Amino acid sequence: MKYRYELYKASPPESPYVDTRIDTFIRFDTFKGLRLNEYINVFDQTNYDKIVAKLINASDVAMWQDKLDREFYWVDIDHKKQAEFLREKDKAKATNDVINPAHYKEIIPGYQYMEMMQYMLKEKTGVDAHLYGQIYKYLMRTGKKDDEIKELQKAKWYLDFLIAHKVSGKPITVEEIQKLLVIGGSVI
């Protein structure tokens, strides 16, 4: 341990008494917090008389804990392990990226789903563009996010809606899909 901590109870300013040492400890992670009129003197372990910090409030304690964390993180650990930890953290962040999730990346090498859709849907507009986009999306990510059958069922649902919408020639409700598919002759 690099530091020794002494917890003191401060005497009132008008009191002739000196501050009272309450406790001495070497592990800061066991410290529970300061109470009213308490403070901590932090000593360098190599020089017991040298006070390196005086912690008088919760803010001081938090800053000291942050300092200890940085010292541990950057000095006391193996740099190879540190680099691996940071790589794993970045990898986990990329996996959990809600804006750019893994199941939409590299559909075609070098392209992501949204980049491809700009070209695939450029001739489509309105509801058609949306429905074709949904169909393409579920077919392209099949098996990458959800179960393959579930993804194919989603693509089929949007395809059925698109067919029913085309048969109707006007806006439809979800309840009308099956009836319109029969009229269109596409019931599977």
Image: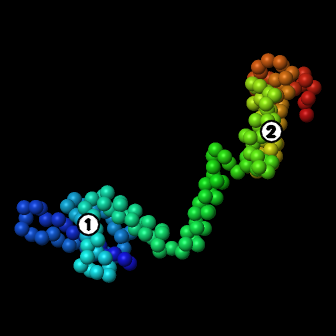
- Residue 48 image offset from top left, x and y in percent: 26, 80
Q: Which residue is mark 2?
A: 136
Residue 171 has which mark?
A: none
Which one is closest to the eye, mark 2 or mark 1?
Answer: 1
Residue depicted at 58% across the width and 72% down the height: 80
- Residue 46 image offset from top left, x and y in percent: 32, 81
Q: Using the image, determine if residue 4 lies above or below residue 123.
A: below
Q: Which residue is mark 1?
A: 54
Q: Which of pointers 2 and 1 lies earlier in the amino acid sequence? A: 1
Residue 146 visible to the viewer: no
Q: Is residue 111 left or right of residue 187?
A: left
| Labels 2 and 1 touching (C-beta < 8 A) | no
Helix, strand or loop at label 2? It is: helix
Residue at far right of view: 185
Q: Quadrant of the N terminus?
A: bottom left
Residue type of the residue flagged with mark 1: Lys
Residue 159 sits in quarter: top right
